[in-house]
Amino acid sequence: MPTNNIRSRSLDRLLRGLRSHIRSRDLPRPDHLTISTRSRSLSLTFVDGASPDRLAALLLWAATLEGLSLTWSCQRDVLHIVGTGRTHAGIRVNLAACGQLPELAGRIRAGIVVVAGTYRFPVSEPESVQYHELMHVARAARAVVKAAAA
């Protein structure tokens, strides 16, 4: 019984730390969020909203993390973006977002993914991506949404 009590307190502390991180920065829900320590992890999945909004949510989260690492890949016209970093309190966070490639200003041409007319990488092969590159994609995706609405 004491072991369960210690684990429960550890999980409570982890959740309080995450809640504090979210509230102090007014962060939106990412598609997928995993928080972890050496001994425990917790995964949450939300997938809600349009692709550009989900990418923007991931970018807002990514901007609050230290030691950020971002990758993207594409499978069957779906762009997957994964980020890993740590909060200021040291909580390890894994983020993920995905969206239909056309909604994110992208297309596949001859086995190469072209995103926002600028960034290219092979289909199905994860590749490192920089924060500013994803910001450019988010802006291009917003333009696609505006053009479709007009």
Image: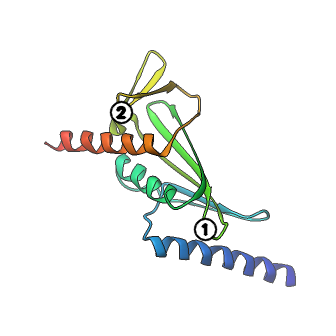
Helix, strand or loop at mark 1:
loop
Helix, strand or loop at mark 2:
loop
Residue at 60%, 65% in the rendered image: 87
Q: Nearer the viewer, residue 111 or 48?
A: 111
Compared to residue 49, the image places residue 78 above or below, namely above
Q: Position of residue 27 (x, y in %)?
A: 44, 66
Amino acid type, mark 1: His
For disc 2, the marked residue is 116
The colour scheme is rainbow
Compared to residue 51, the image places residue 38 above or below, namely below
- Quadrant of the image containing the N terminus: bottom right
Residue 49 at least partly seen:
yes
C-alpha distance separating marks 2 and 1: 32 Å
Q: If you read the primary sequence from the N terminus, does the residue marked by circle 2 or circle 1 appear first? A: 1
Q: Residue furthest top?
A: 110
- Quadrant of the image containing the C terminus: top left
* Mark carried by residue 88: 1
In the picture, measured across the screen, residue 84 lies left or right of residue 145, that is right
Q: Mark 2, mark 1: which one is toward the viewer?
A: 1
